[in-house]
Amino acid sequence: MKYISLFVLLFSLSIVQAQQTDSVFIKSLFNSALTEGKAYEDLRSLCKDVGARLSGSAEADMAIKWGMNKLMSYDFDTVYLQEIEIPHWERGSKEAAWVETSKGEIIKLDILALGGSVPTQGLVHHELVYFKDLEALKAAKKKEVEGKIVFINQAMDATQITTFNAYGMCWPMRGLGAIEAAKKGAHAVVIRSLGLPQDDHPHTGSMVYNEDVEKIPAAALSTNSANLLAERIQEEKLTLSLQLNCRTLPNRKSYNVIAELWGSEKKNEIITFGGHLDSWDVGEGAHDDGAGIVHSMEALRLLKAANYTPKHTLRCVFFMNEENGNMGGKTYADWTLERGDVQIAAIESDRGGFAPRGFSCAGTAEHVTWLKTLAPLLKPYELHKFEKGYGGVDINPLKDNYPSIALFGFVPDSQRYFDFHHTADDVFENVHKRELELGCASMAALIYLIDQQF
């Protein structure tokens, strides 16, 4: 009996010692990120020296060069490109929209074409028909809609404390609105932007078509423009004048950018982490997803600077084409399987560069339980969310090829994200240096703990 008690004691002591070692190392990562970090300057360079990076654009091509050069400058074990095929959509010249009242008053509106929209083929003028949400449009009779422009005014639910929940509830309006409007004979659809602030900045974003339904132009109004239309249409008949000059070009070649620190014990077992290098073509893609790019790159740099030798191979991926196709994520998942990789875990940062709050896990109950065991180590850094949730768009395809993989999503504070998401305001100046650095250290800490404990 005494031997069992001694074994338990020694085992308990070993756990305490390991936790103390982990605690000291994690503290060093945070200290380094906050006092000697490269993330803020790297984000400035991506935003200002390259700019917005829509898939297929010259800026996206230059971002690939930027990513290669930056990763190589940090002397990781290897840096290389993975070829992918991506869709190529262009906004064209600036969109224009006006509303004309029955009394002849003309008011200019703030508007952006949705990503993937077809053009209007010149300036078009049609009566506007109002629906409070997508379900109301679905329930409408065809004669109410035919020959008109549909306006869907579903607002994000301000009572949702986690703003991504509110966004998810509204996404079908943006993604499927053109299909439902076209089914009933509409000439075009305009929606209220998916954003919580009341302002003049429209939010773009992806939408889809059904090949069996006519493709009609689709655009998003700023919340202030949507409020104006919603108020005026209750009082009088409105005509919307709209011009979109976007176009879809043939698919083209592009690349994911990859860097690795090789594992000393299990080189073929991979911990993937990253963000998406592409962005929409308005703003600078600072929070979405420049922050995720530098979170991931800086996490790997911090570990290397600490002279850390990983057990598994740590692979940082700058995914291309998350915004309008996810071909970077899909191609990567199949490519890793073809190579014979063993993917044991993946982490994505794609929720902005705000103050870190924790991580979500799309995995087994055991994975979620393991994540919760990290709370004592990470609570000193105000990380407190460790729960079941979503990993990320880019890493989610890995689940199809590796059913047992643990997917983790970086969770920052979400209250300001939809002030900037997919707008011209998503610029470097709206990222807080210290919050960005804390996110980098948080990513590095989770990568380290996965490497040590998986």
Image (cartoon, grey):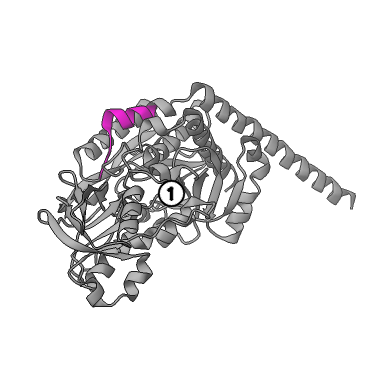
In front: 256, or 339?
256
Q: Amino acid at mark 1?
A: Leu
- Which span is picked out in magenta? 42-54
* Residue 195 shown left or right of residue 20 in the figure: left
> Image quadrant of residue 388?
bottom right
Q: How many marks?
A: 1
Near mark 1 (Cα within 10 A), the count class, few <14, some 14-19 or many ≥20, is many
Q: Label the magenta part by its dominant secondary structure.
A: helix
Q: Is residue 350 visible?
A: no
* Numbered disc 1: secondary structure: loop
* Residue 142 shown left or right of residue 1 in the figure: left
Relative vertical location of residue 155 with respect to residue 71 in this rendering, above or below: below
Q: Which residue is label 1 attached to?
A: 196
Position of residue 316 measured from the top left corner of the image (x, y, whole percent)? 41, 40
In front: 366, or 59?
59
Residue at 56% over, 30% down: 29
Position of residue 107 measured from the top left corner of the image (x, y, whole percent)? 23, 48
